[in-house]
Amino acid sequence: MTKTVPPAASAKLSAPQRALLKLDLQRDIDLALHLPLRYEDETRIVRLADVRDGEVAQIEATVQACEVKLGPRRQLLVTVDDGSDTCTLRFFTFYPSHQKALAPGARVLVRGEVRGGFMGRTMLHPQFRAATGELPTALTPIYPTTAALPQNYLRRAVLAGLARAELRETLPPGQSPVAWSLRQALEFLHHPTPDVSVEALADRSHPAWQRLKAEELLAQQLSQLTAQRERGRLRAPVLQPRTDGPALHAALLQALPFALTGAQQRVVAEITADLARALPMHRLLQGDVGSGKTVVAALAAAVCMDAGWQCALMAPTEILAEQHFRKLVGWLDPLLAAHGKRIAWLAGGQKKKERDTMLALIASGEAALVVGTHAVIQDKVQFQRLGLAVIDEQHRFGVAQRLALRGKLAAEGQEPHLLMMSATPIPRTLAMSYYADLDVSTIDELPPGRTPVLTRVVHDARRDEVIERIRGQIEEGRQVYWVCPLIEESEALDLANATATHAALADVLPGVLVGLLHSRMAPAEKKAVMSLFTDGLMGLLVSTTVIEVGVDVPNASLMVIEHAERFGLSQLHQLRGRVGRGAAASACVLLFSTGDAPRLGQVARERLKAMVETNDGFEIARRDLEIRGPGEFLGARQSGAALLRFADLSTDAELLAWARALAPVMLDRYPELAERHVHRWLGGKAEFLKA
Ligand code: ADP
Ligand code: MG
């Protein structure tokens, strides 16, 4: 989270002060909790003769010569002698102050990497200072910082912050998982004594680190639990399937062309139980791509409408929302018509007249179900009585949008039930920590009759073979997707690339209808292309990543992803999920290119390997977490969660369990300590976590 500093205030601040604000280092405690990335050992002096080449060392030596050498590159060459050997210090950028401090005869401490060489031993741009005979007694901390904030300035600021910070104990008596207090841990981590195990510091297994990680996890658990308890005080409408007449819910189940899977039945039961309570539901429905979440949402909507309340369903893109709309209209419209109700549609590109009609239907309550994009949460949309909001692909929506939806229930003191759906499963440890305030339902079974998608990684040089394969699929009456990547942060360039690919493919596939879909197209145009593909008239659909989510065309059997090395793992998995939706054997081809490099980078290789090795969304999510780490996995911006700085969920499961157990006890028995603890760690961010 970056703070915006008002211009008037920032004008008076120095550059490093502004940088401190930007790093969110405002309060003393924030500075005290800004911990070193690593340390440098300046407590020891070694003999130059004992230093091996390539080693970083600190020596104390006397300057013998100091001269500026002219030539193609001006440089300052300083020869020093520590009695065991000599060494040349070399500076390409230097100031008169260098020459002054390094004048012949000066006694100096020099620290840097020692290199052997033709001209004798050298250090390039070493650190140096006058030797005073005194050495620091602690390791020197190196803090994470930015260019505008010099290490020395930050070090002084942190020291001052640490000295002033209020560090009274917030853990209840006898509850610390380690013997160290917060103050001891902080003082130690900012200035560890040189005898400490460097490994224990580096891998953060040292008790001082344990204490900090425990505190951080506790703060997070406390704020989540507080949010959960606050929600527990809110009220929501009790939504129960009606028993006094024909129920939509039952009628829909009857009308479906398939039977629900066991997993679908289970999650429907979980959701229905939530809806029947006067507490607002806050549930995440997770299930792999193609696992059949939409019908579960439709059944939840049916329960809501049965009870006489309105339901809203929101999807991140117009294509996806449109597809939901069509599906829900197909399933529900005939049933709703019997009750004089209908389904409304809201999207950004809508004509004003149509929109006004929809708004009126929603306000009067005649629209029992409202489907659309972000347009659903705009201020103008007034529900008569919103009982349930469903958000598809919830990770695409921000916290503010979720809050806005919850605010749509006019009745005082009540909130609508909230069902969020996601095809990107949250690994268990993450669910326990970031989403403690969320109930989770999981569809862990695909509908019967699906064949697993075969995935192949293919070098771009073999593009021709891939095109042959496309031709083969289309001749068999199948359909194919070709996804073009994001090349850079420029929509125009991505578009140019997709357009060129489209033209080239149309050229080599005469007689095949090749379509193009990208985000800049007008909604009507997109709709036209999409329906040609959905209706099976279009053999090949070239698109940018706009089809990433939700598109459902069971006849599509081949997915080609160009420059697959540029996509994230979960995005690749989502894209692959567009095929293998029917009974036909399906495949996914990951085309990659290494550009000018001899081979792919490590991370890209791991991602593609994971794609070949597994089709299981949960396994993909687990590997994604492993490759990227939880911070990136969640995306701070999207989740709004204050990410963990110190704890690592993959290694600190025990501390997490400790924090989970302690949080409720603290809230019940030590509310004042709990409040101080959360304030210390999260400051103003605690509010944000509640969404
Ligand atoms: P997702 O979970 O990715 O949103 P969808 O809801 O789009 O998946 O469902 C994928 C496809 O599976 C759709 O065509 C849907 O109608 C179909 N489907 C859902 N449930 C079942 C089921 N129990 N049996 C057969 N097909 C199903
Ligand atoms: Mg879906």
Image (cartoon, rainbow, N blue to C red):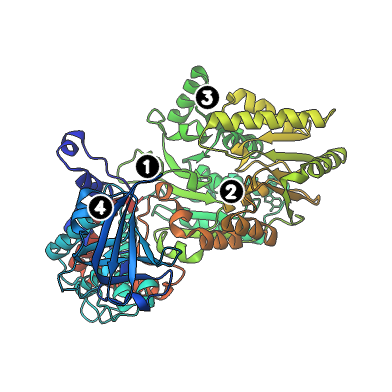
Residue bearing mark 3: 349
Secondary structure category for the residue under label 4: loop
Residue bearing mark 2: 571
Q: Residues within 10 Å of mark 4 (few under 14, many from 20)?
A: few
205 shown above or below 491: below
Residue bearing mark 4: 150
Q: At x 19% / y 47%, what residue is drawn?
A: 17
Amino acid type at circle 2 is: Gln
Marks 2 and 4 sit apart, C-alpha to C-alpha, by 38 Å
Q: Is residue 392 visible?
A: yes
- Residue furthest out toward the left: 164
Secondary structure category for the residue under label 3: loop
Marks 2 and 1 sit apart, C-alpha to C-alpha, by 24 Å
Task: Tell me the quarter of the picture where residue 210 sits.
Answer: bottom left
665 shown above or below 297: below
Marks 1 and 3 sit apart, C-alpha to C-alpha, by 22 Å
Decide: marks 4, 3 in contact (CB < 8 A)? no
Q: Earlier in the sequence, mark 4 or mark 3?
A: 4
Residue bearing mark 1: 400
